[in-house]
Image (spheres, helix red, strand yellow):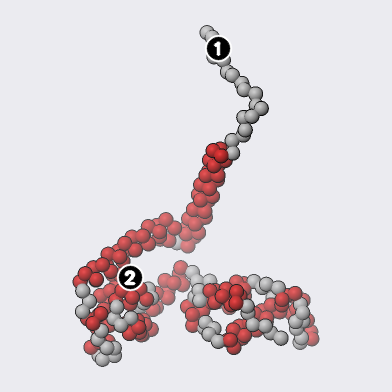
């Protein structure tokens, strides 16, 4: 009998599943879907094991008692078999396609409804939006209000200048922090340089840790002087 995942396995799968837009679109929400996904895992275990696959090809059967089916499987490898890793180029391509699309318009109007016109939350929730794009987002919402597609919320139409300025300051501070992190990681210099920068940072951290441990050892792990023979260096007379 095919067993459904344990709570721990289900949580791991969900965290992996929701790591991409594809995962969000097919996130399992019922026991039947979890069972379907678990069955796919069993199929993957059989097809990825030479002996199990040979048995299935020759006899059309699966050995349910096999260690291959009961042992912890490499879920990451299974997931990557279904979906590729999301790269920086993928994100940039998605952003280019998403902005100005019908999907973005729908998301903006839905965010406006969900948060009842609160621009703080709207700007946080809409994908790929920078603080400098707030006028564009406000214009889209205002057009929807004028067209009668969404109601007019006071939180939006009567938002104070003070709140707008506070949001702008927060966004500018976050943008500065993001820019510093981007430069430190070499994100502006391509994927290869990014990998090199990360590896360099890892080596630097390892070196710092080694130095720290050496200092702690020198400070707290000094050899005992008990029973030791003292040596006095006499200054040579000229």
The quadrant where residue 50 appears: bottom right
Secondary structure, mark 1, is: loop
Q: Is residue 92 left or right of residue 62?
A: left
Measure the C-alpha gap from mark 2 to mark 1. 75 Å
Viewer-proximal residue among 215 and 52: 215
206 relative to 162, above or below = above
Q: Quadrant of residue 91?
A: bottom left
Residues at discs 2 and 1 in contact (Cβ within 8 Å): no
Query: In the rendered structure, which disc, 2 or 1, sits on the residue that comes first in sequence?
Result: 2
- Name the residue carrying label 2: 130
Q: Nearer the viewer, residue 19 or 112?
A: 112
Q: Position of residue 34 (x, y in %)?
A: 59, 84
Q: Secondary structure at mark 2?
A: loop
Residue 147 visible, this angle: yes
Q: Position of residue 155 (x, y in %)?
A: 25, 80
Q: Is residue 49 visible?
A: no
Q: Which residue is under mark 1?
A: 236
Residue 49 is left or right of residue 168, and the answer is right
Q: Farthest residue toward the front?
A: 226
Image quadrant holding the N terminus, namely: bottom right
Q: Residue at x 29, y 78 (%)?
A: 118
């Amino acid at each position: 009998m095919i067993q459904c995942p344990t709570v721990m396995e289900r949580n791991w799968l969900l965290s992996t599943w929701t790591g991409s837009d594809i995962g969000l679109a097919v996130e399992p929400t019922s026991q039947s879907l979890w069972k379907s996904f678990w069955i796919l895992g069993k199929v993957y275990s059989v097809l990825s094991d030479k002996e199990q696959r040979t048995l299935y090809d020759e006899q059309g059967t699966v050995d349910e008692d096999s260690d291959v089916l009961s042992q912890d499987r490499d879920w990451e490898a299974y997931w990557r078999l279904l979906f590729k890793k999301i790269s920086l180029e993928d994100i940039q391509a998605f952003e280019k396609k998403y902005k100005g699309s019908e999907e973005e318009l729908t998301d903006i109007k839905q965010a406006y409804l969900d948060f009842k016109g609160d621009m703080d939350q709207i700007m946080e929730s809409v994908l790929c939006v920078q603080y400098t794009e707030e006028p564009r987002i406000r214009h889209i919402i205002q057009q929807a209000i004028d067209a009668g597609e969404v109601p007019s919320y006071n939180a939006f139409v009567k938002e104070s200048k003070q709140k707008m300025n506070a949001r702008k300051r927060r966004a500018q501070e976050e943008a500065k922090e993001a820019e510093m992190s981007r430069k430190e990681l070499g994100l502006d210099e391509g994927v290869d340089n990014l990998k090199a920068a990360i590896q360099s940072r890892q080596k630097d951290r390892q070196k710092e840790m080694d130095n720290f441990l050496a200092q702690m050892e020198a400070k707290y792990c000094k050899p005992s002087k008990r029973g030791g023979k003292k040596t006095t260096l006499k200054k040579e007379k000229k």
